Image (cartoon, rainbow, N blue to C red):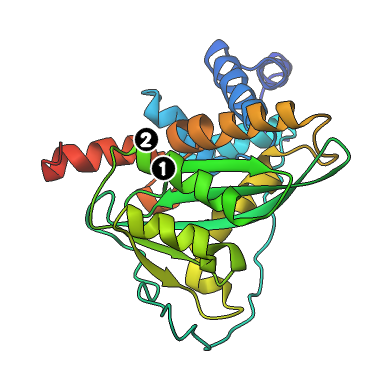
Amino acid sequence: MFEITRSTYYAHRLRRRSPGVERIRLRSRVNELFTQSRSAAGSRSIVSMMQEDGEQIGRFKVRGLMRELGLISKQPGSHAYKKATIERPDIPNTLNREFNVPEPNKVWCGDITYIWAQGKWHYLAVVMDLYARRIVGWALSGNPDADLVTRALDMAYEQRGKPQGLLFHSDQGSQYGSRHFRQRLWRYRISQSMSRRGNCYDNSPMERVFRSLKTEWIPSVGYMSVQQAQRDISHYLMHRYNWIRPHLFNGGLAPAQAEQKLNVVSGIS
């Protein structure tokens, strides 16, 4: 019917069954990156990571390779947040969703979430520098108290070289409004900003971090021990999230890499 020889037909079928060496190599690399992400990375993230390694590849090809391997990202759908307009009178919403920051160590934001470990809930406090969305401090504890958020702030303050002129933004959690935490901010000469009550959009960069951590990394059954949780969460926040995981805000660069690049371009030491 198509006026082709039988040998041509069988040769074509053989080529389809036997992918080339280069495609096998690319498939192996895609599978490796997908596995390292704990089945979280989609085609966009994998393309960014491969291009960062010097690989010349596009998203269409990565999609095809993932389809061949049967790889499906476990990224969740969008979430509808509740809106509110009530500010805390003594700590206003100074940041007011101005999440694009021109320099590092100018605006930090923080939040708390819960983690299941060793048969009970533990609480994780994280501090982020909004400049390139880099995680700069964190703490894990069995109690969601003021000491937890203060330890995360202390870690950030020491790791970032004790910066001056900072604004710290958070939600209206009692830990962030406590005397203990506010005294620490005063000692470090850090100004304070708080979201409006019940408005997750006012602190959305932190919400995104916790969403990524829980859907991409933390085991669905939690951790067997607190020590395991500390090691695994530290690895994700300070290594994978900061140095490896592509971030859409940074044009596909991981936060720490983007910060280094932006610092060079801006002449910031």
| x 29%, y 42%: residue | 162
Left or right: where does residue 100 sit relative to residue 123?
left
Q: Quadrant of residue 169?
A: bottom left
> Considering depth in this image, is 246 or 169 the residue closer to the camera?
169
Say the numbered circle drawn on residue 194. Answer: none
Residue assigned mark 2: 159
Q: Amino acid at mark 2?
A: Gln
Q: Label 1: which residue?
A: 156
Residue at 52%, 72% in the rendered image: 201
Name the side, left or right, on which 66 lies relative to 149: right
Identify the residue shown where x is 45% and y is 37%. 242
Q: How many marks?
A: 2
- Residue under the image location 53 percent in, 64 percent down: 176
Residue 207, above or below 64: below
Q: Is residue 5 visible?
A: yes
Q: Report helix, strand or loop for mark 2.
A: helix
Residue 42 visible at all: no
Residue 197 locus on image (x, y percent): 57, 80
Whole-percent x, y for residue 190 in the image: 32, 59
Classify 10 Å Cα crowding around label 2: few (below 14), some (14-19), many (20 and above): few
Q: What type is the residue that disc 1 sits on? A: Ala
Instruction: For marks 2 and 1, give the CA distance.
Output: 5 Å
